[in-house]
Image: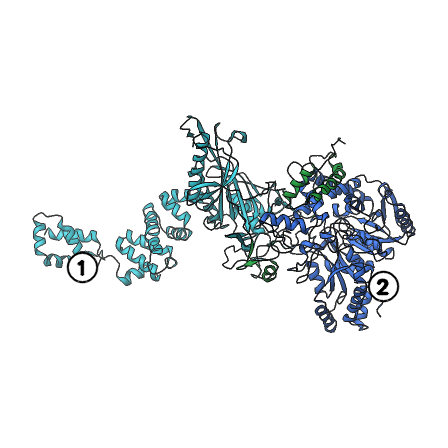
């Protein structure tokens, strides 16, 4: 086993992760998650010290699966149900806030 | 090619790498059984729980889509993967309903190979995004295109000028069409070109990326013209910055093309950092293509049609066609098939070129113009017949056009049409002698002048003969007859 | 009065066939129990609106002679399994009012057989947890002792069976989510070999770990439901081929390995019941050997790296745009962040951030890649164990059902409840939790059998031999 520095997740790290994951967090949450993530990561840190041989044999129980390119299903089979779940539509298209900021 | 700095006199080496996305033509989408029809007139028609990312849905890989990419790879002389897998590329965007795109990262289907001598890095398989329309403060999303199979080809950074970049893209488009794997229209977004552009002061790419200058990625280039203009513009822009002729610095960024102003512009489209957190998609088992005979390069190669460069060589060697005619046939499969049919019963360079000429100019003219009829009415065998009849003196070149026009309109055989409409050339001297005699008798004044030495009047007599035979007289024979009889 | 406490699928089927009672009477008997207990136990988050239609269809199947063993059998459905036209919200605020737009393969198959799904059973939000305390709609109480949790994540499904609020139930098991609550409540839970049952329609937590799983009071009921669900599906590429289930794998007596060092980390009261159970097994003629399998020490760490990684990607699609609960922000990005920040509970957010961390540039090789490699090592070590032994036997959980609220604010404490169960999911092998007995305080303790890949039938066989 190699000796590894225990991982620490600072509040800045939590904010960065939250940004990557699109999560709006309160300051209190940031503080709480910083402690909790640190404790969990320090537990899983035990994998970091394990030596892994370069040539890990990968065991795949199933390989080479395909679907034939035929039988397109009828247009709009589930369309109504899917559109019905969309909060806002215009001309059967989903409305979202403007998605390109091209300044 | 190299550019000289006007201020410093330094030499700059342009480096261009292309990333080209192309939609694959299949019946169904990449991971679901929705019809692959991104241009359905009605939005959100070809959608299902899978391609709209409903909770709990799973992908199921379309075999044909994978095969199409592998066929492209075989055509390019690439290495086909034995082991391959699909990965998730994670990022948020409304046009990507799962918040990850299924793509390939470490193990693309295809590596290496080349096209027009340009080295290729890789080709991988992924799924297309939905389309969005922007309307004021909102965007409208249509999922018809969501999860349509998409290949991405990446060249090595070995292109040095806009012409070559465009030529490469055009050749790829031609290849995809020839293979029948994609329509690849840029205007429709079926093929999308991104160019990575940089200028280096220390020479061309030799495997050492650190040699290259800071690159910009220019996107949304929706025609070959724009590809060319954007590369030229971007090289000039970068050069001006490097030379200190314009302010600013070159930053690694994505840029778009402004068609009105004819310039590139900085495009900050995503606010999230570019950390896609790729990992193998656990919903899709891995592939070992060596275990699948139908994916062996031998089998795939056997499935390929004649490739553009093979056809070029053959048409040039076997038929001595002009380069522009060859390119015409490569771009127009319908006329190419006609040509192939026609020449199958002809022999001789002259005959091939005549057949080609009638197809690539005359028939195309009818096809593109407002002539009545359709090209499907014209069989290759009849084009060949027309060429043979000309050689045999049975048709004049004018008669040939008349026959082709009639064939285009109503179909049938060249012989029947020529006979029916009286387009056959009269080469029978006996039949023409009487006409010649009559014309000489009717034109005493001209006869007199000819005999006094006004030789150019021969054309007048031949013209009268053509008129009298309503174009079916063989002008050569008429000319000889007039010469002979006027000398008497 | 139908004796729901001792009712099995086969008995119910026979009674329905003979016309001793109708499908409606059977369903109404369960509905009466639900009416009586649901407010207190919080088992179902909603009842389905098509029960009466389904009852009529099932009764008609009896009339037509097309009834199967499962026709008219009332089942609970975990809130993360899609049933078209019904609210399927994964016990999450972010999907609170989401109506599924399609049915899971298992729902289609079982409804085809005539099953009547009664309602959506509470669970930890998106199946993340071991207590159902992470449900946005409150904890499910343990029917054995309502001051304790039912366990999780399939707590609602398990409690429904235990409290006679369904004859059997479907849950899911990603790291013990059917086995652990089964142990806490004293019923049976089977996690089949990975790929046995189509996952299509089960809201994923860890795609390479998840299984849709049956729970019931008897092993025969489990077998009936499991066999009706499993098999290849054109909507799940990871399903195993049907042939693997045709092999005869049962034996007269079995060899069983007990990883003693690991087991002895359990609470004393659990060990006591467990070792008594081991004695009983030996008395029935099976061979039990104490072994040490060091790689098992790594399983939980591997699990809590790979799972968050898959979670962070799997739940990314919940953004309120196409469906679900949207919290509008000042622009699109703000809407994403607010919707997800407010829509997800703490455990989901924790796992999203953990997963984002272990997959992000610079960390993936230290965590994710390492864990993937260790996962392969775990499989190969287990292969060696199963070359010698038919089963590995452990307690299902190291403790009895915790008191509600006792897990507090330390997520790791809850994770450690999974120490015995995550191995099966990480390796993809089948595992079965059986009620091993009760503690002196009358709290159930579960014993878990793990078997080699595709030896699911062997698990069912040992359970039958042991009288379950």
Q: Chain of mark 1?
A: B
Q: Which residue is mark 2?
A: C5
Q: Colour of chain B?
A: cyan
Disc nearest the viewer among 2 and 1? 2
Report how many numbered discs are placed on residues in the image.
2
Asked which colour scheme the image uses, the reply is by chain
Q: Colour of chain C?
A: blue
Q: Crowdedness of circle 2 by 10 Å Cα count: few (<14), some, many (20+)? A: few
Q: Quadrant of residue B270?
A: top right
Chain displayed in green: A
Q: Chain of mark 2?
A: C
Q: Is residue B456 shown left or right of residue B250?
A: left
Q: Residue at x 57, y 46 (%)?
A: B125
Q: Which residue is mark 1?
A: B468
The image quadrant where one finds the N terminus of chain B is top left
Q: Is residue B418 shown left or right of residue B46?
A: left
């Amino acid at each position: 086993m190699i000796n590894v520095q225990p991982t620490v997740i600072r509040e800045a790290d939590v904010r960065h992760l939250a940004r990557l994951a699109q999560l709006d967090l309160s300051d209190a949450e940031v503080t709480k998650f910083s402690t909790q993530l640190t404790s969990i990561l320090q537990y899983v840190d035990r994998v970091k010290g394990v030596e892994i041989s370069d040539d890990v044999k990968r065991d795949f129980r199933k390989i080479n699966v395909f679907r034939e390119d035929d039988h397109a299903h009828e247009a709009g089979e589930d369309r109504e149900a899917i559109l019905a779940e969309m909060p806002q539509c215009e001309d059967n298209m989903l409305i979202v806030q403007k998605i390109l900021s091209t300044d | 090619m190299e550019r000289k700095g006007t201020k410093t006199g330094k030499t700059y080496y342009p480096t261009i790498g292309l990333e080209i996305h192309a939609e694959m033509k299949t019946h169904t989408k990449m991971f679901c059984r929705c019809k692959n029809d991104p241009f359905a007139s009605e939005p959100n028609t070809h959608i299902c729980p899978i391609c709209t990312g409903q909770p709990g849905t799973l992908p199921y890989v379309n075999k044909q889509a994978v095969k199409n990419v592998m066929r492209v790879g075989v055509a390019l002389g690439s290495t086909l993967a034995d082991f391959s897998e699909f990965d998730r590329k994670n990022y948020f965007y409304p046009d990507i309903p799962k918040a990850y795109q299924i793509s390939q990262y470490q193990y693309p289907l295809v590596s290496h190979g080349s096209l027009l001598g340009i080295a290729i890095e890789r080709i991988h398989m992924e799924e297309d995004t939905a389309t969005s329309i922007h309307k004021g403060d909102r965007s409208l999303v249509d999922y018809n295109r969501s999860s349509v199979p998409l290949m991405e080809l990446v060249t090595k950074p070995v292109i040095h000028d806009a012409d070559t970049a465009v030529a490469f893209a055009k050749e790829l488009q031609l290849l995809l069409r020839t293979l029948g794997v994609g329509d690849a229209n840029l205007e429709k977004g079926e093929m999308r070109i991104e160019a990575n552009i940089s200028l280096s002061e220390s020479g061309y790419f030799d495997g050492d990326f650190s040699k290259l200058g800071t690159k910009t990625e220019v996107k949304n280039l929706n025609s070959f013209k724009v590809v060319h203009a954007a590369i030229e513009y971007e090289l000039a822009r970068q050069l001006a910055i490097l030379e200190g002729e314009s302010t600013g610095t070159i930053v690694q960024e994505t840029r778009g093309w402004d068609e009105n102003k004819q310039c590139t512009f900085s495009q900050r489209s995503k606010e999230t950092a570019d950390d896609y957190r790729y990992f193998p998609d656990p919903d899709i088992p891995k592939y070992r293509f060596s275990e699948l005979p139908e994916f062996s390069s031998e089998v795939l190669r056997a499935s390929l049609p004649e490739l553009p460069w093979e056809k070029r060589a053959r048409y040039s060697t076997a038929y001595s066609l002009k380069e522009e005619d060859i390119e015409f046939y490569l771009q127009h499969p319908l006329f190419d098939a006609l040509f192939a049919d026609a020449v199958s019963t002809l022999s001789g360079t002259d005959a091939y070129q005549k057949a080609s000429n009638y197809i690539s100019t005359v028939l195309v003219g009818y096809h593109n113009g407002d002539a009545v009829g359709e090209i499907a009415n014209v069989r290759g065998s009849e084009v060949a017949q027309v060429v043979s009849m000309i050689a045999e003196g049975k048709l004049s070149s004018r008669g040939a056009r008349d026959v082709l026009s009639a064939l285009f309109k109503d179909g049938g055989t060249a012989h029947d049409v020529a006979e029916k409409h009286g387009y056959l050339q009269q080469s029978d001297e006996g039949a023409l002698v009487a006409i010649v005699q009559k014309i000489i008798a009717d034109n005493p004044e001209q006869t007199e002048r000819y005999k006094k030495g006004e030789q150019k009047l021969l054309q007048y007599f031949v013209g009268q003969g053509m008129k009298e035979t309503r174009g079916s007289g063989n002008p050569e024979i008429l000319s000889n007859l007039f010469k002979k009889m006027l000398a008497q | 009065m139908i004796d729901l406490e001792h009712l099995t699928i086969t008995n119910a089927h026979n009674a329905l066939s003979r016309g001793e009672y109708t499908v409606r009477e059977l369903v109404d008997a369960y509905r009466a129990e639900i009416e009586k207990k649901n407010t207190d136990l919080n088992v179902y988050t909603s009842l389905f609106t098509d029960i009466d239609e389904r009852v009529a269809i099932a009764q008609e199947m009896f009339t037509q002679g097309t009834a199967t063993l499962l026709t008219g059998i009332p089942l609970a459905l975990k809130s993360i399994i899609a049933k078209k036209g019904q609210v399927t919200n994964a016990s999450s605020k972010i999907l609170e009012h989401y109506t599924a737009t399609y049915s899971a393969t298992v729902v289609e198959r079982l409804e085809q057989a005539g099953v009547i799904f009664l309602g959506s059973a509470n669970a930890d939000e998106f199946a993340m947890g071991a207590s159902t305390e992470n449900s946005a709609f409150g904890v499910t109480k343990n029917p054995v002792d309502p001051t304790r949790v039912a366990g999780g994540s399939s707590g609602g499904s398990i409690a429904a069976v235990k409290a006679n609020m369904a004859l059997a139930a479907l849950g899911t098991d990603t790291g013990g989510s059917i086995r652990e609550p089964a142990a806490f409540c004293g019923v049976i839970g089977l996690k089949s070999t990975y790929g046995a049952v189509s996952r299509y329609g089960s809201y994923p937590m860890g795609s390479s770990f998840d299984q849709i799983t049956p729970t019931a009071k008897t092993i025969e009921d489990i077998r009936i439901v499991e066999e009706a669900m499993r098999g290849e599906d054109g909507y799940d590429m990871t399903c195993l081929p049907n042939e693997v289930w045709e092999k005869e794998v049962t034996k007269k007596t079995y060899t069983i390995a007990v990883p003693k060092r690991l087991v002895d980390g359990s609470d004393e009261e659990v060990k006591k019941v467990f070792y008594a159970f081991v004695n009983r097994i030996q008395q029935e003629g099976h061979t039990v050997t104490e072994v040490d399998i060091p790689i098992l020490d790594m399983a939980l760490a591997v699990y809590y790296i790979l799972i968050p990684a898959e979670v962070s990607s799997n739940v990314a699609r919940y953004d309120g745009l196409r469906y679900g609960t949207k919290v509008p922000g000042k622009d699109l990005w703000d809407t994403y962040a607010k919707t997800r920040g407010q829509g997800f509970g703490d455990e989901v957010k924790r796992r999203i951030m953990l997963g984002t961390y272990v997959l992000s540039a610079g960390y993936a090789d230290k965590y994710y890649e390492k864990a993937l490699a260790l996962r392969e090592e775990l499989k190969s070590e287990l292969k060696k164990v199963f070359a010698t032994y038919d089963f590995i036997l452990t307690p299902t959980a190291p403790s009895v059902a915790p008191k509600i609220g006792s897990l507090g604010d330390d997520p790791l404490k809850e994770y450690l409840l999974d120490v015995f169960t995550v191995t099966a999911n990480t390796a993809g092998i089948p595992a079965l939790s059986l009620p091993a007995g009760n503690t002196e305080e009358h709290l159930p303790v579960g014993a878990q059998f793990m078997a080699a890949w595709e030896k699911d039938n062997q698990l069912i066989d040992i359970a039958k031999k042991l009288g379950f």
